Amino acid sequence: MEIGILQQNLISTLMSSAGEMIVKKSIEKYLQDQFPTVDKGTSDKILKTAIRKDNNKLAIKWTSIVGMKNDTKLGLIQAVAGTAILMLLFSVAGVGTSILEEKENGTINRLLYSPLKRSSILYGKMLFAFFISILQLTSMFLFAGLIFKMDLIINIPALILMIIATAFAVSSLGIFLAAIAKTRQQAQNLSIIIILIMSAIGGSMIPLFIMPSILQKIALLSVNYWGIQGFYDIFWRAQPLEVILPKILILMSIGIIMTSASIQLFKKRL
């Protein structure tokens, strides 16, 4: 996808006479540097093969430097990782708002009369959201592996840790969105706005390399960004675990901060 966008941006410049001269000079310089003994006739043949005139326009023979195997999977990785995290945010937000629904129905009041501690009730909700998140992410990747032949065994330890870290960060964020709202309706409306904004700037809807540089920097504040980039490191860039580990730690840190804040807010509300 990046090569296609790059070609579209460069082609208008390369079509001009100035662009033609730049391309010719670049190829000639490359041949002189790499093959200093090449004769003039061979050099001219190479230039004619690489550059030709079609309807008085410069036409360049493009050669992709991206491997065919990875190139065909890039869109799939973006779709699976981006969609999985986007849908997961809505799922855990629903789990979080169920606390407010139970509060309005009086279920929380009855639980508070039991020997259970307030923190135990909240931890139970968070644990439920966490396991739902793991199940949903695992199902998405298994589906992609079985139906679309995504290579899931390329780095199993990193994939497991990324799923756990992403599930923890997303579930804690869903609970936090419910914690800052006073009513169930307010939580639902707030969740939709925040999740859509985070998904838009974080890369779930649009690949980050298309966005302006300022939005790419703002994306660092989004859970979606760290999750998607982590899965990119696994399936696309084929990075080792030690390279992916910082993203895993950042997701875990987000989860810990959101969980701690949610507990304090819920305790005050209850």
Image (cartoon, helix red, strand yellow):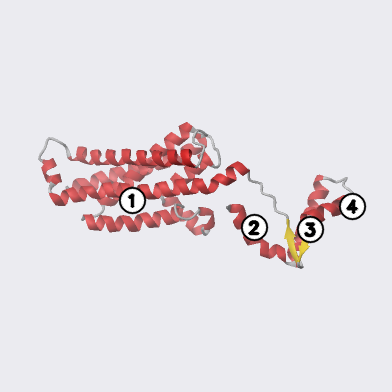
Q: Amino acid at mark 2?
A: Gln
What separation in Å lies between label 3 and label 1 (alpha carbons)?
Answer: 53 Å
Q: Residue at x 16, y 37 (%)?
A: 117
Q: Mark 2 or mark 3: which comes first in sequence?
A: 2
**Residue 264: numbered disc:** none
Judging depth in this view, the residue of 142 and 179 nearest the camera is 142
Find numbered disc 2 in the image and state the secondary structure of the residue it sits on. Answer: helix
- Could you say which quadrant of the image residue 137 lies in? top left
Q: Is residue 242 above or below residue 206?
A: above
Say which residue label 2 marks: 7
Find numbered disc 3 in the image and state the secondary structure of the residue it sits on. Answer: helix
Find numbered disc 4 in the image and state the secondary structure of the residue it sits on. Answer: helix
Say which residue label 3 marks: 24
Q: Residue furthest front?
A: 147
Looking at the image, can residue 268 be seen?
A: yes
What separation in Å lies between label 4 and label 1 (alpha carbons)?
Answer: 64 Å
Q: Is residue 105 left or right of residue 77?
A: left
What separation in Å lies between label 4 and label 2 (alpha carbons)?
Answer: 29 Å
Percent x, y for residue 215?
48, 58
Q: Is residue 222 left or right of residue 121?
A: right
Q: Mark 2 or mark 1: which comes first in sequence?
A: 2
Say which residue label 4 marks: 41
Q: Is residue 37 left or right of residue 171?
A: right
Q: Nearer the viewer, mark 3 or mark 1?
A: 1
Q: Nearer the viewer, mark 2 or mark 3?
A: 2
Q: Amino acid at mark 1?
A: Phe
* Label 2: few (<14), some (14–19) or many (≥20) C-alpha neighbours in 10 Å: few
Say which residue label 1 marks: 90
- Image marks 3 and 1: residues in contact by CB distance under 8 Å: no
